[in-house]
Amino acid sequence: MEKKFAILGDIHSNIEALSAVVEDARSRSVTDFVCVGDIVGYNANPNECVDLIRELNCFTVRGNHDHYCAYDESLDDFHPMAASVIAWTRRQLVGDRAQWLKALPLHAFHQGLTLVHSTLDMPERWGYVFDSIEAESHFFYQNTQICFHGHTHVPVIFQKHGANVVRYDPQNIHVSLGRKYFVNTGSVGQPRDNDSRASYCIYDPTQREIQFHRVEYDVQAAQEKIRKAGLPERLAQRISMGR
Ligand code: ZN
């Protein structure tokens, strides 16, 4: 069977958003799911999101939230709000889920694609790639034609052609020979591009096409769970604003 990939990222314990995206991807005949990390953090359903990702047989790399929720390391470098949710998530993760998150690779070559949460330029430093200058140092390490990433929660395409790196807003792209693509899938569970709908990508290797998709989900249900869990109110507000 011909492969068709759904690439998900920055799910952040939002099971309503993740379920809606999985349903949408299945309706588009996706055969394989992959994830660029941050399954947990921010929203209220970390165990459920880890379980669904595992059920999907979804190949995943480790995000910074996955890392800090699984490893008992100092949270001093985090914004206090993010740190408080990571501490909460550490207490919530039961069974072997933290162990599973711990074992995820920081970057990977999978089925012809490169996957990384932040950037291949020192992935353990969790640098943010917002512009083409930041993408340039990443491309130095990208050996495949396509690499998917996340971390900023803003969907974007960086394309390298010769020495030129150009940034494009999300749009369907035909993968052309002689070019390299560093594609941010946007965030499933906490988008930050002023659009509250869950964001993900589909890659069709046969058609050589990358698509961006946005999916409506039950934001109110996710907000109610955040409030019920006693997590910061700002986290409930931001998912309805997409910021
Ligand atoms: Zn994230």
Image (cartoon, rainbow, N blue to C red):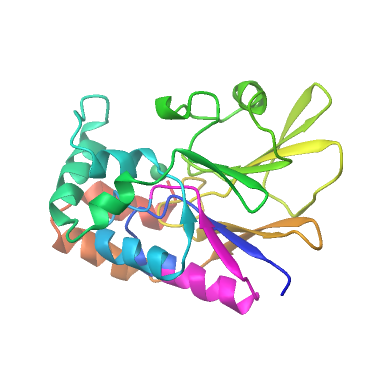
Residue 241 visible in image:
yes
- Image point 18% across, 60% down: which residue? 227
Q: Residue furthest right?
A: 177
Q: Residue furthest bottom?
A: 27
Q: Give the answer, above or below, for where 72 lies relative to 36.
A: above
Kindly identify the residue that appears in the image at 35 percent across and 53 percent down: 12
**How far across and down, in percent of the image, does residue 112 sit?**
68, 49
The residue at 31%/53% (across/down) is 100
State the residue in front, 9 or 70: 70
Judge from the rendering whether residue 4 lies leftward or rightward of residue 6; answer left or right.
right
Between 48 and 194, the one nearer to me in the picture: 48
Check residue 36 for magenta coloring.
Answer: yes
Q: Quadrant of the N terminus?
A: bottom right
Q: Is residue 161 magenta?
A: no
Q: Quarter-wise, where is residue 97 in the image?
A: bottom left
| Count of marks overlaid on the render | 0
Magenta range: 19-38
Q: Judge from the rendering whether residue 3 lies leftward or rightward of residue 127; answer left or right.
A: right
Residue 229 is situated, as x and y percent measured from the top left of the image, at: 15, 59
Image: 116 above or below 54: above
Give the side of residue 145 with respect to residue 234, left or right: right
Look at the picture and state if 126 lies above or below 152: above
Q: Can residue 17 be spotted in the picture?
A: no
Spot occupied by residue 202 in the image (x, y as percentages of width and height): 65, 60
x and y percentages locating residue 74 in the rendered image: 19, 28
Residue under the point 18% across and 61% down: 95
> Which quarter holds ligand 1?
top left
